[in-house]
Amino acid sequence: MAFWRRKKDEFVSLGLNRAAEDRVTEQPGAAETQQPPAVAAPEPAAPASQSSVSTPWQTSVLGLDLSIEQLQAREAALEQEFSARFRRAVAATRESLSERIDTVFAGAKQIDAALLDELEEALIAADIGVPTTMHVLETVRRGISRKEIDDIEKLKHAIKSELLSILQASEKQGVASESSVPENIAPYVMMIVGVNGVGKTTTIGKLAQRIKAEGNDVLICAADTFRAAASDQLAIWAERTGVPLIQQKQGTDPAAVLFDSMKAAKARGSDVLIVDTAGRLHNKSNLMAELEKMKRVAGREVEGAPHETLLVVDAVTGQNGLEQARQFLKIAGVTGIVLTKLDGTAKGGIAVAIAKELGLPIRYAGIGEKVDDLVVFDAEEYVNSLFN
């Protein structure tokens, strides 16, 4: 399954179920914090003939010596692996929601007001949120009044269908796919926003590595010059993943760092530029002015840039994460969500709440600590994983 791809002239696939050696974890050791030069370029890769060792993130361009049947079998295997990993990641949410719903339905012989009240509590407890829960139950009540829902199984199916409908509707707004931008526009600029502590820096590192592994040239811009640690952490990811990093000293105008990065990306023919930004939500007016200036700089250099503004939200924070999303939506023009730590909460229903209340697509989901534990969010897979 392709992770990120605008190029349509080649088939690129990942070795998702290879050994986990050399993967990057959330907490790099202190011994690795040496800061690289302003532009940290990776060493040229050795020819394949010089080594038979395959790393977990070696890109394999298929189609050169494989039949259609072999390609399809490889794709099916990757799809199955993705589904299994996603199901494991949302296990806590599934157990919480399913147990609550099963408790509500246990012994129920008919659908009445008391049953719907209990169901309401179960959905809210899963962090689906009050407004979204009310919407789901209103849809259910209409189905009951029309005699379309007359037993427990049909009620379960109706809830599942409505949750899926909400998630799919959000994909029609914001930016749901990088393929919407023509291939001749480069670099594709992704601006990453979010409050400090949600996993923004780690997400950037994972995104850079995953996009690089799909055969793209990637560059990272360290434009969070307010917090020194942010640049240091990005430097670690850049060094270990072999993705070049543009950074300047603390306190430099973020727009100036972005300008240099845009020039560097165009000079080296980069496909993607990932831009880190400050997470100072408590100082909204300054942050808004900073982000607006950065967007103007990006737009002058590349048509339509930034092409995506992704908000990183910690799933564990639940409704607080939703409030963060509301604030950033006002000041940053967010086009999509990266939901981190989805594997660490029993209240993963926040994905549905964000999709419904903000109308933003969930682009990616963090399902673990390793570098390949960032996946494209699949609405149908998510809902199926919750209920099956």
Image: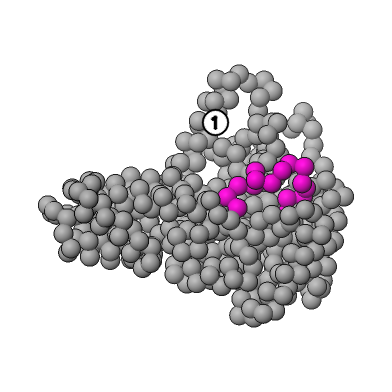
Q: Residue at x 77, y 59 (%)?
A: 299
Identify the image quadrant of residue 108: bottom left
Tell me if residue 210 comes above or below residue 280 in the rendering. above
Identify the image quadrant of residue 215: top right
Q: Position of residue 87 (x, y in %)?
A: 42, 46
Horizontal arrangement in the rendering, residue 24 relative to residue 169 (left or right): right
The residue that mark 1 highlights is: 75
Q: Who is closer to the viewer here, 21 or 9?
A: 9
Q: Residue at x 61, y 76 (%)?
A: 281
Q: Who is closer to the viewer here, 326 or 98?
A: 326
Can the viewer see residue 239? no
Main secondary structure of the magenta stretch: loop
Indicate yes or no whether the magenta region holds residue 181.
yes
Residue stretch rendered in magenta on the structure: 175-189
Give the quadrant of the N terminus: top right
Can the viewer see residue 314? yes
Direction front: furthest residue: 146
Three-letter code for the amino acid on which mark 1 is drawn: Glu
Q: Secondary structure at mark 1?
A: helix
Total label count? Answer: 1
Indicate yes or no whether the magenta region holds residue 379.
no
Q: Residue at x 25, y 61 (%)?
A: 119
Horizontal arrangement in the rendering, residue 341 relative to residue 295 (left or right): left
Q: Position of residue 29 (x, y in %)?
A: 65, 62
Give the quadrant of the C terminus: top left
Q: Residue at x 68, y 41 (%)?
A: 6
Instruction: Please rate how many residues cluster around mark 1, counting C-alpha atoms within 10 Å: few if below 14, some from 14 to 19, many from 20.
Output: some
Q: Position of residue 228 (x, y in %)?
A: 73, 72
